Image: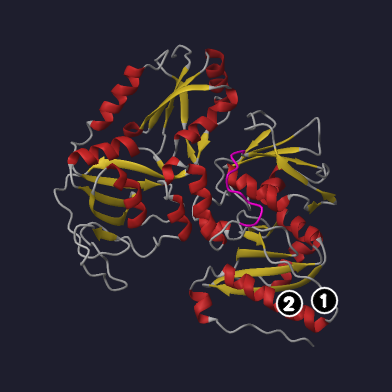
Amino acid sequence: MTEPSKVIHIRNVGHEISENDLLQLVQPFGPVNKLVMLRAKNQALLQMHDLPSAVNVLQYYSNVQPSVRGRNVYIQFSSHQELTTADQNSQGRRGDQDSQPNRILLVTIHHMLYPITVEVLHQVFSPHGFVEKIVTFQKSAGFQALIQYQSRQSALQARTALQGRNIYDGCCQLDIQFSNLNELQVNYNNERSRDFTNPSLPTEQRGRSSQSGYGDAGGLYALQPGARVAFAQVGITQPSMGNAAAIAAAFGGGLPPGISGTNDRCTILVTNLNPDKIDEDKLFNLFSIYGNIIRIKLLRNKPDHALVQMGDGFQAELAVHFLKGAMLFGKRMEVNFSKYPNITPSPDTHEYAGSSLNRFNNNAVKNYRYCCAPTKMIHVSALPQDIAEDEIVSHLEEHGTIVNSKIFEVNGKKQALVLFENEEQATEALVSMTIQNDYVLYCGLCVVVASVLFIIDYSSTVKDWMSKLVDSLWHAMIIASNYGDWFENHKQRPSFSSS
């Protein structure tokens, strides 16, 4: 058995895992002095401040499987007692031996939550030298790009400066290798390829692949307005602001009033809970609407208190903003930032970092669109095809008075909108789970995706009330359709009889 050491060896570190992810894994046990990422081997070396801290890490994770971004990682003591500068430099030289320096770089984007286009890549790579050509494409390894510099020295400088860095905070990580190509062939100047030495090249016709020899990027990667703002100073130098600026596009170009986008505190203190009815999973269902959940802890000495650690500061800010003062199980919740940066892992802590029910790992921008304060209506999707409206009502009516409900289909998949008498009843339904037959119905953002949508105020007349209900249902269905084919084929506003 390896002798205990301040240096911890971590294996199975995928390219989607960042330095911050690993720091978050061990920082509850003590300060981290040094961290070396061994990208070529999918490994990392991490030196704790002292030996007892490292021992505590190993002891805890010998009983709990550590998981980062849904991937199990494996932790053991390193044979190194200290990490020296020589160790770090030698690891860097080994990585450089994988390929010979060339003026063309092959760039793979890992953990890509936001769109990446030619313009984005040019803004990231051009500070290191004149970029002649860029070609983007999709391969089995993920979204990739070939970037051709005017000189080999510029390419080497860019790789040294950018390897392993994130374009946006916590995502869009750059994995850079030297290509063995001598020259890139660019046929079109468009959002997927660009020859900066020949601006007169034509743009391709819609639907055609721009660079079939390299791969097909498809039409997914359109630059959003917020992403441009993020790169005003090259986004990787201002990660938190870059993250917020990119997400702002999901809210229509600007963040909601009261959201700064600059918060870096990830842990939330929730008080005035109903200890007889609340548990960690219910809190997960509620808070996961606003971001990924790392861990949740109910305070045993204060049973109406809980700590919730979110994936990043922006997600925590959304949760605090939208849930402060919300009613749940007869109590008005107080939601504030905690003084603790992290929740220390313990037997009382529920871990959710590796949960497949976290929904902000992929398509995060789309999910941010659904963030809002609790309302009277919930949206339930991914329903069984044979489910009837009365079955949904029977599942949910224990949580409150259901005023109305509507089943509809989007791209052949059944969804439903359910209107409760008040926001508290809708929130209770959202956080709760019921089981019937062979499927699980979550009225939260879990196996079945659900989100709270659009406040409906009661009117003095039935006609006015029904009109508001129709408008709200229609807008909710537009959002649920994700602006896709369903909306294109159903542009007529639905109507309901007032009789």
- Residue 258 colored magenta? yes
Q: Quadrant of residue 53?
A: top right
Q: Which residue is mark 1?
A: 459
Amino acid at the residue labelled 2: Lys
The disc at residue 22 is none
Q: Position of residue 34 (x, y in %)?
A: 44, 22
Q: Position of residue 60 (x, y in %)?
A: 58, 24
Quadrant where the N terminus sits is: top left
Q: Which residue is mark 2?
A: 468
Q: Mark 1 falls on what kind of element?
A: loop
Q: Main secondary structure of the magenta part?
A: loop
Question: Which residue appears at 41% of the width and 28% of the height?
Answer: 44
Q: Mark 2 falls on what kind of element?
A: helix
Q: Nearer the viewer, residue 183 or 425?
A: 183
Q: Are marks 1 and 2 in contact (CB under 8 Å)?
A: yes
Colour pattern? secondary structure
Question: The magenta stretch spans which residues?
Answer: 256-265
Q: Is residue 322 something one can see in this rendering?
A: yes
The correct choice, above or below, for 433 with respect to 29 in the image is: below
Question: Which residue appears at 38% of the width and 54% of the height?
Answer: 116
Q: Position of residue 226 (x, y in %)?
A: 48, 57
Q: CA distance from mark 1 to mark 2?
A: 9 Å
Q: Is residue 486 left or right of residue 290?
A: left
Question: Which residue appears at 58% of the width and 49% of the height?
Answer: 357
Quadrant where the C terminus sits is: bottom right
- Residue 374 colored magenta? no
Residue at far left of view? 182
Q: Is residue 364 something one can see in this rendering?
A: no
Q: Residues within 10 Å of mark 1 (few under 14, many from 20)?
A: few
Amino acid at the residue labelled 1: Ser
Q: Quadrant of residue 367?
A: bottom right
Question: Which residue appears at 63% of the width and 53% of the height?
Answer: 289
